[in-house]
Image (cartoon, grey):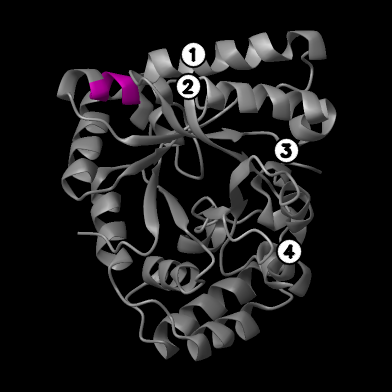
Amino acid sequence: MISLDKKLTLGTVQFGMNYGLSKNNLYKSKKKITKILSYAKRRRIEYLDTATAYGLSETNIGNFHKNKNKEFKIITKLKNLSKVKKKNLENEIFSNVTESLTLLQKSKIDILLVHHYKDLIIHGKKMIKCLNKIRNIGLVNEIGVSVYSPKEAIRCFKIKIIKHIQIPFNLLDQRWLKHRFNKELKTRPDVKIHARSIFLQGLLLNKKYYWPKWFKNKDKVIKNIDFLIKKLKKSDKIDLCLSYVKSFNWINFIVVGINNIEQLKKVLLMYNKKSLNSYQRSFVVSKMRNIASNRILLPYKWKEN
């Protein structure tokens, strides 16, 4: 059984499309997806994280719900709404949500995230009003947003309807440890924080040749991670990454993506190990300080020249 203090959430982008460092076509195998979801259900994983933009992910999850007569709690995300005219916004959101419900074989979405933070800025009060309406008519339980930076998260703390904020967070990404973010977070104790990218799309688990050639500190990162595993007596890189993220009491959900059932079993095994204590966590922070640029922390920037 997984620990109850933080919700281990199964990321499902791989159920819908090729994603991350390893392109293994998991999304093409309904049998493998069913096997993974059945195992996750037996191990009492409650939540799946998906999105409209994740190809066949919602469809494959819905097929499991229908065929196995078992349901997961769902976190899904709206499509990009930046180019939608304000007069059409309500219809677009309603259509998006009802389509997701149909694909997922669900009557209600547990947590709906705005996938693109900029949509909230572009559409402002109109979008807040539409999200409130969707929630009030019973199609969605709670509303949240996915962000890329502490600055974006801080702005979202001002929006009362936002109850969930998903952030990229891992032992290399120390932007979230700065005073202002933590100070603003304390003003919204009702907001749940979801940590994604805890393995940085697999980079933190892999060897040197997987890292972008332009990232000059890759040798230092790999060396420091290997040192920390030995020093802190961790089983491996997965254990180190998970125990670090779990040690932050303000993180409520941890999203982990996998490519096969063996990886899920490994993650669950390591997830139930002890978190780092405050001294160990500080030691990790000191070893990984000032190594990473924003570019390496944000995978969508990796292909930029």
Distance between the Cα atoms at labels 4 and 3?
Answer: 18 Å
Q: Which amino acid, mark 1?
A: Thr
Sequence order check: which comes first, mark 4 or mark 1?
A: 1
Where does label 3 land, which residue? Answer: 117
Judge left or right: residue 211 versus residue 10: right
Sequence order check: which comes first, mark 4 or mark 3?
A: 3
- Range shown magenta: 61-65
Query: Tag 1, which secondary structure?
Result: helix
Q: Quadrant of residue 161?
A: top right
Distance between the Cα atoms at labels 4 and 2?
Answer: 30 Å
**Spot occupied by residue 259 in the image (x, y as percentages of width and height):** 35, 42
**Spot occupied by residue 45 in the image (x, y as percentages of width and height):** 28, 48
Q: Which amino acid, mark 4?
A: Glu
Q: Main secondary structure of the magenta part?
A: helix
Viewer-closest of 133 and 58: 133
Residue 74 marker: none
**Residue 154, visible in the rendered structure:** yes
Closer to viewer: mark 3 or mark 1: 1
Sequence order check: which comes first, mark 3 or mark 1?
A: 1
Give neighbour class at mark 1: few <14, some 14-19, many 20+ (Cα, 10 Å). some
Q: Which residue is at a point 29% across and 73% down the rendered structure image?
A: 273
Closer to viewer: mark 2 or mark 3: 2
Q: Compared with residue 62, is residue 150 higher up or lower down, i.e. above or below? A: below
